[in-house]
């Protein structure tokens, strides 16, 4: 469901000091524009028009390829640090996988939809919230606390918080499920202090982290272990292991509990509990099952996040050039010195080049002769997540329930597993919280199957062919049925004013994603996400192909780590002081 929560800082610290330790992913979905050729208009409140030439001189201290969340966070912080930064974006809109688009007055989110932690501040805040705080940007949000769940056992409104879910368990599961859920909370919640011990913005990719993170936050880290006691501290050692190990150690056997926790893990990281770090799940439990917790949706849509990052970057002198397609990374005397655009123009980078593209797409930009075999092999051997099916709809609100919620989750079959294709459908109707996303008395809807659509089914198809159109109709039907179930008898697919179906080829075409992939399919306990430096001096990577992994919080953290690594420890520490962490 595209979680916008923080990636566990405990994990960040250990990965930085011990690269061999494992990490996992934080889930976030995306879609570019529709595959039917209809194009979007502006991204939101910040107007950024496509230009034939980018602003200023064709050089910068740091040149960033791609304006995804990771690239914009990196650029914004570098600008805040006083660096001359230039972001080059091939698309005519900024935001990458998180951009928004408009058709017939309907403003659609392209991907991220389920968020929390934007209003948090201080050491334990969401990394994106910390970046926005550093840039002096605010992000008004609507708050809510539930989503509708449709599962084989029935349908119910699932509320976050410490007590509400027990009522659902009593009705849809069993007394054993209630006892096991309490047992799980009792074991997991005390571990949250360790998972939250370090602010994500304190991490950098060199030994300066000993100053900005280890020494600076050692008291809070030691205090968290002391408060847990010997048994809790021992349990904290499992934070860097798959969450399934905690479940197994507690001997949780109730089928509903096992299925439910698998679903939460899948929504968070795109994998079941045997593939997600315990630290991620512990953080999520701490955020969702404590008194007063809530979810947040940015007013004016997810494009408002991109607008805030662009505005913050420009405020500190950063530059963004749209329609600037990078064709090649230029390497001279063994060092990255700039990029060559499709137009043939060379853009010089005085200090560094940073790629916000996927590892496979980044590899295509590098001259083959400068890529070490070990680096090439690592990329080629990294497994890829599958792609997506998406459904974007614009329709009249007449006949639709007045108390319709923003989020709906449909699970068709527990036995197949939540990560099986055509099985889990996620639905977001953001206009119920932000009415300006649709014309008066209208709704916008985004349904999708996250990271489970096989690219092989679509590979080689001509997008104009009857075969492609028939496959779109066939593979999107499960989403249509889920939408009809969630919206009720008052909804009619025939009356929708906008109907857009996105396929893996949509991702490949508009987002320039290799094979339309969601990102690296790296599982906790088996492998770790790559760091941000590369074998090529002055060349760095951020985004969902690097640590901490996939998702808005993770890519925001990755961009911050790269930015922090390109400035002095003194500058980094001054920024932490300035934002009060």
Image: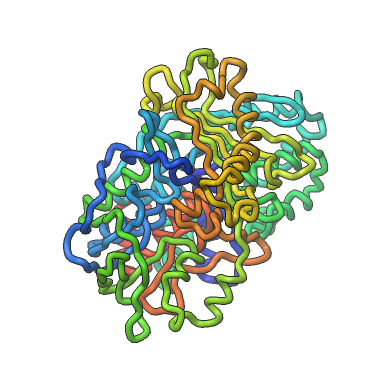
Q: Nearer the viewer, residue 206 or 229?
A: 206
Q: How is the image coloured?
A: rainbow
Q: How far from the left and from the top, in percent, is residue 513?
A: 49, 57
Left or right position of 20 against 432: right
Residue furthest toward the front?
466
Find residue 466 and report its image quarter: top right
Q: Nearer the viewer, residue 495 or 362?
A: 495
Q: How far from the left and from the top, in percent, is residue 124?
A: 46, 49
Q: Nearer the viewer, residue 241 or 69?
A: 69
Left or right position of 236 against 463: right
Q: Is residue 215 above or below residue 108?
A: below
Residue furthest toward the top?
399
Q: Is residue 222 above or below residue 133?
A: below
Asked if residue 117 can be seen in this view, the reply is no
Left or right position of 390 against 155: left
Asked if residue 27 can be seen in this view, the reply is yes
Q: How far from the left and from the top, in percent, is residue 187?
A: 69, 46
Seen at 56% across and 20% down, the residue is 492
Find residue 241 and report its image quarter: bottom right
Seen at 45% across and 59% down, the residue is 543
Q: Nearer the viewer, residue 96 or 268?
A: 96
Q: How far from the left and from the top, in percent, is residue 299?
A: 38, 32
Left or right position of 253 against 429: right
Q: How many marks?
A: 0
- On-image quarter of the N terminus: top right
Residue furthest toward the left?
56
Residue furthest toward the bottom?
333
Seen at 62% across and 43% down, the residue is 471
Seen at 50% across and 48% down, the residue is 506
């Amino acid at each position: 469901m595209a979680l916008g929560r923080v990636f566990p800082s405990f994990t960040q610290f250990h990965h930085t000091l011990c690269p061999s330790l494992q990490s996992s992913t934080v889930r976030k979905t995306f879609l570019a524009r529709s595959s039917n050729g209809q194009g979007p208009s502006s991204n939101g409140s910040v107007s950024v028009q496509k230009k034939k030439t980018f602003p200023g001189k064709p050089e910068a201290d740091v040149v960033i390829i791609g304006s995804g969340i990771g690239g914009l966070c990196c650029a914004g912080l570098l600008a805040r640090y006083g660096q001359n930064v230039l972001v080059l974006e091939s698309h005519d809109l900024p935001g990458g996988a998180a951009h928004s688009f408009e058709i017939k007055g309907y403003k659609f989110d392209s991907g991220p939809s389920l968020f929390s932690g934007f209003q948090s501040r201080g050491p334990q805040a969401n990394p994106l919230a910390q970046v926005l705080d550093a840039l002096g940007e605010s992000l008004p949000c609507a708050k809510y606390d539930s989503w509708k769940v449709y599962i084989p056992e029935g349908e119910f409104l699932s509320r976050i918080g410490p007590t509400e879910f027990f009522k659902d368990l009593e009705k849809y599961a069993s007394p054993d499920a209630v006892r096991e859920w309490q047992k799980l909370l009792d074991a997991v919640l005390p571990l949250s202090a360790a998972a939250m011990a370090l602010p994500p913005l304190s991490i950098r990719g060199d030994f300066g982290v000993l100053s900005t993170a280890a020494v600076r936050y050692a008291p809070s880290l030691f205090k968290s272990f002391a408060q847990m006691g010997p048994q809790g501290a021992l349990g904290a050692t499992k934070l860097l292991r798959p969450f399934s190990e905690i479940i197994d150690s507690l001997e949780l056997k109730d089928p509903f509990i096992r299925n439910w926790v698998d679903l939460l893990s899948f929504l968070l990281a795109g994998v079941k509990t045997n593939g997600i770090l315990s630290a991620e799940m512990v953080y999520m439990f701490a955020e969702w099952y404590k008194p007063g917790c809530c979810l947040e949706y940015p007013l004016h849509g997810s494009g408002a996040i991109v607008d805030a990052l662009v505005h913050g970057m420009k405020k500190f002198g950063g530059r963004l050039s749209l329609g600037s397609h990078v064709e090649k990374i230029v390497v001279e005397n063994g060092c990255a010195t700039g990029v060559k655009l499709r137009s043939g123009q060379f853009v010089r980078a005085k200090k560094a080049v940073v790629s916000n593209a996927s590892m496979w797409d980044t590899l295509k930009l590098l001259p083959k002769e400068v890529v070490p075999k070990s680096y090439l092999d690592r990329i080629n051997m990294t497994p890829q997540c599958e792609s997506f099916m998406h459904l974007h709809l614009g329709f009249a609100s007449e006949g639709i329930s007045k108390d319709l919620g923003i989020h709906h989750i449909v699970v068709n079959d527990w036995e197949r597993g939540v990560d099986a294709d055509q099985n889990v459908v996620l639905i977001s109707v953001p206009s119920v919280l932000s009415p300006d996303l649709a014309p008066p008395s209208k709704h916008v809807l985004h349904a999708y199957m996250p990271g489970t659509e096989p690219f092989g089914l679509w590979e080689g198809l001509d997008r104009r062919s009857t075969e492609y159109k028939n496959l779109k109709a066939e593979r999107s039907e499960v989403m249509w049925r889920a939408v009809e179930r969630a919206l009720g008898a008052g909804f009619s697919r025939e009356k929708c004013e906008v109907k857009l179906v996105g396929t893996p080829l949509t991702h490949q075409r508009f987002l320039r994603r290799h094979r339309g992939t969601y990102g690296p399919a790296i599982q906790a306990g088996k492998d770790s996400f790559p760091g941000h430096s590369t074998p090529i001096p002055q060349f760095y990577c951020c985004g969902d192909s690097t640590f901490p992994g996939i998702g808005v919080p993770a890519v925001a953290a990755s961009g911050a780590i790269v930015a922090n690594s390109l400035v002095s420890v003194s500058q980094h520490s001054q920024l932490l002081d300035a934002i009060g962490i």
